[in-house]
Amino acid sequence: MSRRGKSINLFLMDGTANGRIKCTLANWTGVVYKLPRTELDKCKGREDLSQSGVYFLFGTSDQTGENVVYIGQAGTRKNGEGILYRLQEHKRNPDKDYWTEVIVFTTSNNSFGPTEISYLENRFTSLALNAQRYSVKNGNDPTPGNITEEKESELEEFIDYSKIVMGTLGHRVFESLSEIKAPMEINIDSAIEEDGLLLHLKRKIRKSGQTIEADCKQTTEGFVVLKGSHIELYDSDSIPPGIKEARQKAKVNESGILQEDVLFKSPSYAAAFVIGGHANGLTEWKTADGKSLKEIENIEVAN
C-alpha cells in the first residue's frame, strides 16, 4: 500500500538554511525547532520554548568520530521557564560540550505534562537505541510513567509524526539501516521488497580459501551490507584505503560474520568491503534468480 503524502512547513527563522528552523506539520499539534547551539540566546522570549517538551542534543564524539545524541525532557518550572532554560543549562555544562545543535519537540497548545514528556523521552530513547544510528549518551533509562491506553495511543501518534519531522530535519536517529534482522535466514524469492532491493554475493577467495556469502539491501541512502553476512577477513594488497578503514571499524567476529549493518554509497564499495579488495558491485551483487544489479538497472532503463 502506497503511503500518503505529507505537507510540512519549514520556517527559516533567520532567513538561512543553517540557522534556526521552526517546523510544523499539517493537522498536527506538534511544534519542532532545530536550533544551532550558538543561536540559543536568540530564542529568549519565545512562549512555546518556555513550555514542557522533549529535546535531542546532536553532536560528534571527539574520541571516536561517531554521531552522538542525548535525549532529555524539560518541564515547566515555577519561574515560568521550560525547555529553553534547560538547554541553556546544558550549554554551560562542560560534560555536554559535544553537541552542536538541538531539536526540540513541543506542542502548539501546551498540552504536555510530566506524564507525557516522560513517556515520550522513554520511547524516543528506546527507538534511538534500537536503530543504532547514533551513540546514545543517556546514562540512565528514562521511566515511561503510568499512562492510560487512550493516552498511549495519542502519544504513539505523536511519535509517528515526530519520526517524519526528524528525518526531514536531517537526523535519521529513529531509522535503522535495515529493518531486516536476520538476513542470512531470509528466503529471497522476490528480489523487490517495499523498502528496498535484496541482493546476494558469493565468491571463493583465493588468499584464504574461504567461500564468503553476503546479503545487501539497496535503499534510498545507498547499499547496506546486512548483519549476519560472511565477509573475508584478509585484505588484498590493492584494497582501497577507505574500504580498509571501514573493515577495521566494522564489528566482525572471529569467523568473519558481520555483527551490524554497514552502509555504503555505491555497490562496488559494498562488494569491496565484503571481499577485501577491488570489486565491481554491478556484477558481483545478484538477486536470488541470478540477475546482476547491472542487468536489473538495464531493464529499468529500457522500461
Image (spheres, rainbow, N blue to C red):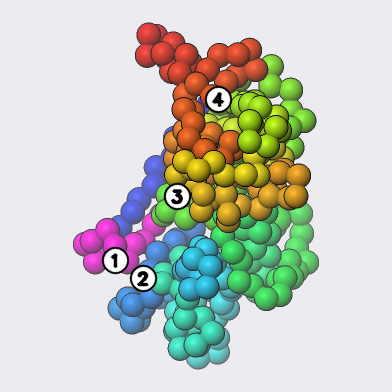
Q: Is residue 255 left or right of residue 248?
A: right
Look at mark 4 in the image and give the residue it sits on: 285
Look at mark 1 in the image and give the residue it sits on: 19
What's the amino acid at mark 2?
A: Pro
3D distance between C-alphas at marks 4 and 3? 22 Å
What's the amino acid at mark 4?
A: Trp
Span of residues in magenta: 13-25
What's the amino acid at mark 3?
A: Pro
Does 22 lie within the magenta span?
Answer: yes
Look at mark 2 in the image and give the residue it sits on: 36
The first of marks 2 and 3 along the sequence is 2
**As displayed, is residue 231 above or below residue 160?**
above
How far from the left and from the top, in percent, is residue 54? 55, 68
Look at mark 3 in the image and give the residue it sits on: 241
Category of crowding for the residue at label 4, using alpha-carbon neighbours closer than 10 angstroms: few (below 14), some (14–19), many (at least 20): many
How far from the left and from the top, in percent, is residue 39? 32, 76
In the picture, the quarter occupied by the N terminus is top right
3D distance between C-alphas at marks 2 and 3? 34 Å
3D distance between C-alphas at marks 3 and 1? 35 Å
Contact? badges 1 and 4 (CB < 8 Å)? no
The first of marks 2 and 1 along the sequence is 1
Q: Residue at x 53, y 68 (%)?
A: 64
Q: Residue at x 36, y 61 (%)?
A: 22
Contact? badges 2 and 1 (CB < 8 Å)? yes
**As displayed, is residue 270 above or below residue 126?**
above
The first of marks 3 and 1 along the sequence is 1
